[in-house]
Image (cartoon, grey):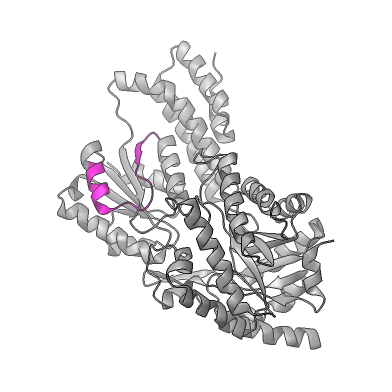
Amino acid sequence: MNPLLDWLHGGPLIIDGAWGTQMQQRGLEPGVCPDYWNLDHPELVEAVARLYVEAGSEIILTNTFRANPVSLEGASAEKVREVNIAGVGISRRAAGARVKVVASMGPTGKMMMTGEIDEAGIGRAFAMQAAALAEARPDALLLETFSDLDEASIALRASLATGLPVAVSFAFDSGKNKDRTMMGVTPEQAARRMAAEGASAIGANCGAGPESFASVGVRFRDACDLPIWLKPNAGLPVVEDGGVSYSMSAEAFAAHLAGLLDAGACFVGGCCGTSPDFIRALVAERKRCVSG
Amino acid sequence: MADLQKLYDAILDGDAKTSAAVIHEALAEGADPVSLISGYMVPAMDEVGRRYEAEEYFVPELLLAARAMKAALEPLRPLLAASGAQPAGRVVIGTVKGDLHDIGKNLVASMLEGGGFEVMDLGADVSPEKFIDAVRASGANIVCLSALLTVTMPSMKKTIEALDAAGVRQQVKVFVGGAPVTEQYAREIGADGYSETASGAVALARRIGN
């Protein structure tokens, strides 16, 4: 039995939105790894988590996307463990009893193809992070923004060893239709392999705006039976004045919800460019979708 | 006779074993290294770049092709050196201070190596001082700066200013790239060039690197 299906008795659930921009507004400096804030400024990280709980998120993630020992280069094993445990604890305090906490794990940022890291190195990194996260008892683990199927597969195996349910989400940001990962992986390839290897949900995050996520969702649905997790960006980034911004409004973003639910999404949130306002808009839009 | 079309195809297919084998065969038959490079290898990498930009090829194909190109270049290097031929250019490359992302930078480094450039990769989170030292030590004529974060883009400007202050700015062309970087930003900070893609960076380096 897939444990994540138990969460869905009341219908589709709303996840959270971007954390990085909220932390920058609270003083996160460029070049500082956000995950260290779990130890250095836990109250500020918790404030961000609370924003999403108050906005109506029914699932929040943790500030642990980069907290694997490869990305936290130079950190001791004990430090890696502390960052992860603190991250889950912060989200749990903000979540209270009602909201689920799903612990985030991103890719290592190193490629096996270039020989920077090998399979064993990837396996060790995720085993260490997953074990630390599991100690703090999140409701599930999430592997997100992956682009390499082999890395995702190794990370999944290491995560499943904790006994927690694991969702795996890929970034489809390449190809003419924005339906391939940077490594060329298709939604079908990702869905089939992750389903076969024991994932509890298959997802897409980051990458592109909500327009292209509906077709990715449909392709997941046709390729496997897993619940579908979608966290699009707020449209495509616009470059102006030497900086990047996302021009899509919260309402325009939420207007895509019906399409995403039709495509089979069970978990919907936002990635880059989204904020608590986007989550409020999604919650309001879901009410319309469900009652209408 | 060595089948040189196979050399072209091997690079396009990312088959390093075959590309090296054809080179050895061709050299044994007395082929001219320079015409192997300009007649088959560079055109193959150009086609790889075209396919990547057309999003027919993805990162793995690009890396494998660069590896096949490198494998073919390896046996040619001593011959080129003996004949006095210089590398296409000497490149110092790194992700700027404060930014830990190096996938894009690694792609550019691989493609430049595949394009016949000598590449010194300084890694990620590289201080302006390290760039200056590397330029001095290597005699580079090209410096490539990468940034993935909008918040670390100002480090590009600082690095260019530091190269200037150290008196080495005039001996190099500075190219910048990375997801948030634009042509306009490159001009604003006084860079000599910008490319949106890894293959574009090779074309840029060939065009205005020297």
Question: In which quadrant of the rendered view does residue A231 lie?
Answer: bottom right
Q: Quadrant of the N terminus of chain B?
A: top right
- Which is nearer the eye, A47 or B203? A47
Residue A223 position in % (x across, y down): 79, 56
Queried whether the magenta region covers residue A97, the answer comes back as: no
Camera sees residue A235: no
Q: Is residue A136 left or right of residue B147?
A: right
Queried whether the magenta region covers residue B130, the answer comes back as: yes
The image shows residue A39, relative to residue B108, as above or below, that is: below
- Which is nearer the eye, A54 or A96? A96
Q: Quadrant of the C terminus of chain B?
A: top left
Question: In which quadrant of the rendered view does residue A257 lie?
Answer: bottom right
State the extent of the magenta-drawn residues as a range.
B115-135
Camera sees residue B41: yes
The image shows residue A209, relative to residue B24, as above or below, that is: below
Q: Is residue B31 left or right of residue B189?
A: right
The residue that appears at 63% across and 78% down in the rendered structure is: A95
The residue that appears at 41% across and 36% down in the rendered structure is: B113
Residue sitting at the far top: B29
Residue A71 position in % (x across, y down): 48, 53
Residue A157 position in % (x across, y down): 69, 49
Residue B20 position in % (x across, y down): 51, 23
